[in-house]
Image (spheres, rainbow, N blue to C red):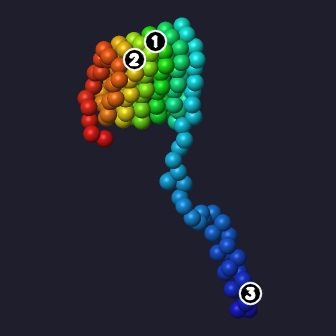
Amino acid sequence: MKLFKQALLVGLMALFLQGCQLGDDDDDTVEEASDIIRAVSDTSEQISRSDLYSFILTGDSNQFTLEDDLESINISGSDNIITIVEDTQLQSLTITGERNLVKQESGVLIRIEDIIVLGDGHSIIINEYGTVNDNGSGTSLSGTQVTL
């Protein structure tokens, strides 16, 4: 009888532990961003994703509206307008080319950790930014530099 009780107890414990996870918690998992790539000119588009993403644009004279969970923006080209319409914190913004505009919609809070600018005549209108590496000329940066 004692052996039967022990076997029953072990069986119940095994059943109970099936739902338990041993080892590392998934809370420490870092979500990797997917890339949204556009190589276009004279295009207007709104991008909305439910997962973390990086936006990469190559081309001229485009207008893109970006929503949701942005990690980074990389623009190569000229005369593009990028509007961010939801509160977010980006790891980086990289702009090459000429006369690109990156701005936030009114009432939205945007923070960009690192800004890298190559080329001339860009405008960046955001709330806060960390570091700036501007290797161009005529860049207009509106926002408050903060320590991150």
Disc 1, SS: strand
Do the residues under discs 1 and 2 have CB atoms within 8 angstroms?
Answer: yes
Task: State which tag comes first along the sequence, 1 or 3.
Answer: 3
State the residue at coordinates (47%, 21%). Answer: 75
Nearer the observer, 58 or 65: 58
Of badges 1 and 3, nearer the viewer stands 1
Q: Position of residue 9 (x, y in %)?
A: 67, 81
Q: Position of residue 146 (x, y in %)?
A: 26, 36
Disc 2, SS: loop
Residue that label 2 marks: 119
Under mark 1, the amino acid is: Ser
Residue 37 visible (yes or no): yes
Residue that label 3 marks: 4
Q: Position of residue 108 (x, y in %)?
A: 35, 25
Please rate how many residues cluster around mark 3, counting C-alpha atoms within 10 Å: few if below 14, some from 14 to 19, many from 20. few
Residue that label 1 marks: 78
State the residue at coordinates (70%, 76%). Answer: 11
> In the rendered image, which quarter is residue 95 located in?
top left
Under mark 2, the amino acid is: Gly
Q: Residue furthest front?
A: 135
Say which quadrant the N terminus sits in.
Answer: bottom right
Distance from label 2 to label 3 (Cα)? 79 Å
Say which quadrant the C terminus sits in.
Answer: top left
